[in-house]
Image: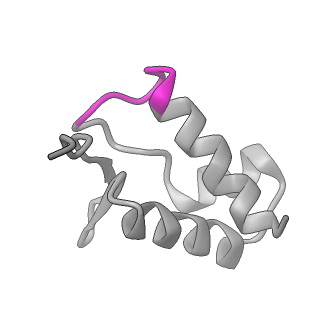
Amino acid sequence: MKRYDQVAQTLTQRIEQGQYRVGDRLPSVRTLCAELGVSVSTVQEAYRRLEEAGLAEARPRSGYYVLPRPTPS
């Protein structure tokens, strides 16, 4: 598993466990780099994966935020 996938999985688990709730701001890229010991590009790719999965959104000049889970149809 690629390191960015591991970071995305860690963040997904934290969201699912309620550590980060809907509307919460996720840690900054640099904070997460320091916490997990990974590069800026690794964290950026992990956040991009969370966006693709519909779990987070980037807000310009503000950071990444947790989105509500889509309801199954």
Q: Quadrant of the N terminus?
A: bottom right
Residue ID at (59%, 75%): 45
Residue drawn at (22%, 38%), measured in percent from left and top?
Answer: 23
Nearest the camera: 60 or 13? 13
Q: Nearer the viewer, residue 33 or 7?
A: 7
Q: Is residue 23 left or right of residue 26?
A: left
Q: Residue at x 27, y 60 (%)?
A: 62
* Span highlighted in magenta in the image: 16-22
Q: Main secondary structure of the magenta part?
A: loop
- Please tell me which residue is depicted at 71% across the width and 66% down the height of the picture: 4
Residue 10, magenta (yes or no): no
The x and y percentages for residue 67 are 25, 47
Q: Image check: 51 left or right of 57?
A: right
Residue 14, how many percent across, how many down? Answer: 55, 31
Q: Position of residue 63 (x, y in %)?
A: 34, 59
Q: Is residue 17 above or below residue 50?
A: above
In the displayed structure, 53 sits above or below 21; it is below
State the residue in front, 36 or 46. 46
Q: Position of residue 19 (x, y in %)?
A: 48, 23
- Single out the residue that lies furthest toward the front: 73
Residue 39 location, quadrant: bottom right
